[in-house]
Image (cartoon, helix red, strand yellow):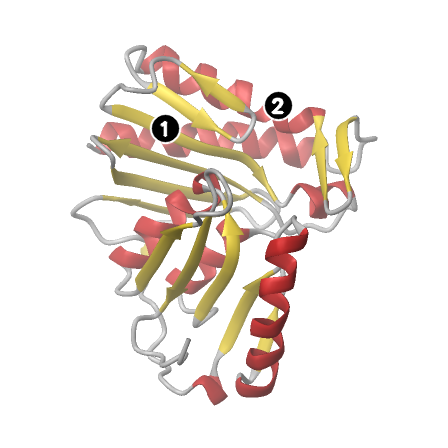
Amino acid sequence: MTHYRDAAEKAARSAGELLRQNFHRPRRVNAAEAHDIKLEIDVEAQNLITTSLLQEFPQHALYGEEGIVGDQTSVHQWVVDPLDGTVNYFYRIPHFCVSIALRFQGEIVVGVIYDPMRDEMWSVQKGDKPTLNREPFRVSDRADVAEAVISVGLSKTGVTIESGLPLLQEMVHRARKCRLMGSAALDMAYVACGRFDAYIEQGISLWDVAAGWILVETAGGSVDLRPRTDMKDKYSIIASNGVIDLKL
């Protein structure tokens, strides 16, 4: 499976370099909504990833934020967010990443998250320990919410914002600090390596959290991902170090 992980890292670095090189250049907006922006470079980054992965593995499928490629019933499916943190990127906030995961028969077996501005690569394959720039890591061991740093995501729709606000209010009072950073994948990576103790969001897509899911679990943490019955292809998620008692 190492060749899958290597291929994901290579694709993530290529897309990350594209994003980094264009970070200070004018943005071309494909679509703008109340709480979200779609950029032309999102599509360019996914096309770069698609070419890199499917040229090497032509029988695989790709399921990404910017579209799908190949037979989605394939036993190998790449789950890709080419630019997680697009709004940050648009406003030149250097907190965004590339997220690539591989599912085999529905199970995530490879996860890679790359932050091109800090040159940080979180990477893992099933059966191995996760690494950050080739150094192994684990989740934090903080069990007390009063000592914890917790990320609470506020999603893009009115429904999920309204459901997330009470949760944010509760955690602001209970935790040492709450953070709203604008990149779900990096939130997951930060939980995995112990920078955060938990990440909670009420409406998220699989491509946002697929790579982070395997990173958190292989680092010793836990992920509770549940489909939302009221929103197609959306999930609620609680990712944590596995010992903290959030009382949710």
Viewer-nearest residue: 175 or 128: 175
Residue 208, x across and y down, in percent: 49, 44
Residue, disc 1: 78
Type of amino acid at the residue the image marks with label 1? Trp
Kindly tell me whether residue 132 is visible in this rendering: no
Q: Quadrant of the N terminus?
A: top left
Task: Give the total of numbered labels.
Answer: 2
Question: In the image, 219: left or right of 19?
Answer: left
Q: Residue 112's quadrant in the figure?
A: top left
Q: Is residue 114 above or below residue 66?
A: below
Kindly tell me whether residue 47 is visible in this rendering: yes
Neighbourhood count class around disc 1 (C-alpha, 10 Å): few under 14, some 14–19, many 20 upward: many
| Residue lying at 56% horizontally and 72% vertically, measured from the top left | 167
Viewer-nearest residue: 118 or 154: 154
Of all residues, the one furthest to the left in this rendering is: 127
Q: Quadrant of the C terminus?
A: bottom left
Residue 165, x across and y down, in percent: 64, 69
Question: In the image, 149: left or right of 169?
Answer: left
